[in-house]
Image: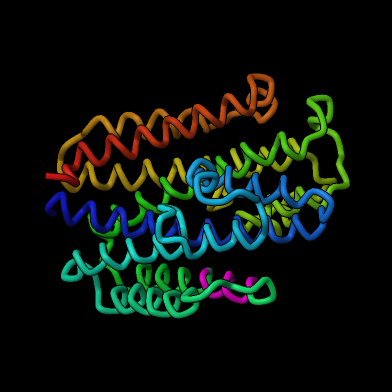
Amino acid sequence: MLGKTAGGIYWMFRSLERSENTARLLEAGFRIALTRSSDSVSEWKSVVTTAGVRRAFDAKHDAYTAANVTDFLLRDASNPSSVITAIENARTNARMVRIAITTELWEAVNETWMTLKDGLKRPVRETDLPAILGTIRRQNALVRGALHGTMLRNDIYDFAQVGTALERFDNTARILDVKYYTLLPSASFVGSSLDNVQWDMILRAVSAHRAFHWINEQEMTPGSVAQFLILDRRFPRSLAFCATNLKSNLDYLEKDYGSRLPCHDMADSLSEQLRDKEIGSIINTGLHESIGNFIRENNAIGAQIERDYRFVG
């Protein structure tokens, strides 16, 4: 497959994943802001920080209000991580690789673009925010269903999975990194029981709320949340699961093309680091430092994949 086609598939699914992640982050911020009405500014600032667009936001807005943050993350075409920008990018890439994907997958992406373009053509009122965020999640689920239900399990499918895994890893890591010490009163609280609804909101931001409580019967603690989101391989948005999925799909590409490239070794290393670790050792080493290293390694793998598979001629 041509590198340009591989890159189109890869970025189509990175962009789709980013749009859904942004919607989930906004939903969590909205919920927390409602419970912290006395300090909603700090929560909206943390949402923008987690999305990685704080500098761009500060250049355009003077205040961290619900209206400013929501509009910037949903509709602002100048924001590379906004939902509308991500969906536009996904559709552009889907058009570029249209002959390489099934009709059902193209139609799902195109429908998602048309639906969200219409839904986001004007500022979203606070009362309408839950509905539009739900629409973003459902449309992304439609695209994933078309991918899994109609595509051959070949290199095209693998590049789609690689893009999704990289973007999802980055999102979970950033949410945990920004929120963990924002919500943790002090290091002495690590491992303690905290009756804090905001930990629930972290889990909701990555669709982990119900799954966490299914397998954690004890009281929720900062350590148990971190362990689940970093190391639990059963949860499809944990760092360990994403790293394993990334490695396995790169392994398939290695077999398909008969060539082992630097990105394969880098993905193996990241997956190995997250295998059989204890959350206590990560926290003792420094959670912020550890997650920062994971994010940098994930980004480096993404850049290496682009070079190895010649996405740009």
Q: Does the magenta stretch include residue 112?
A: no
Left or right? Give the position of 296 relative to 92.
right
Task: Give me the residue at 27% from left, 58% from top.
Answer: 9
Of 247 and 114, which appears nearest the observer?
A: 114
Q: Where is residue 269 in the image (x, y as percent from the top left)?
A: 40, 28
Q: What residue do we see at 60% from left, 44% from top?
A: 175
Residue 135, x across and y down, in percent: 54, 75
> Residue at image x 48%, y 65%?
75
Image quarter for residue 125?
Answer: bottom right
Question: Residue sitting at 52 percent across and 58 percent down?
Answer: 72
Q: In this view, does 184 lie above or below 213?
A: above
Find the magenta span and give its range.
Answer: 129-136
Vertical position of residue 260 compared to residue 45: above or below: above
Q: Quadrant of residue 177?
A: top right
In the displayed structure, does residue 260 sit left or right of residue 132? left
The one of 282 and 121 positioned closer to us in this rendering: 121
Q: Which residue lies furthest to the top in this view?
A: 285
x then y, percent, for residue 229: 62, 44
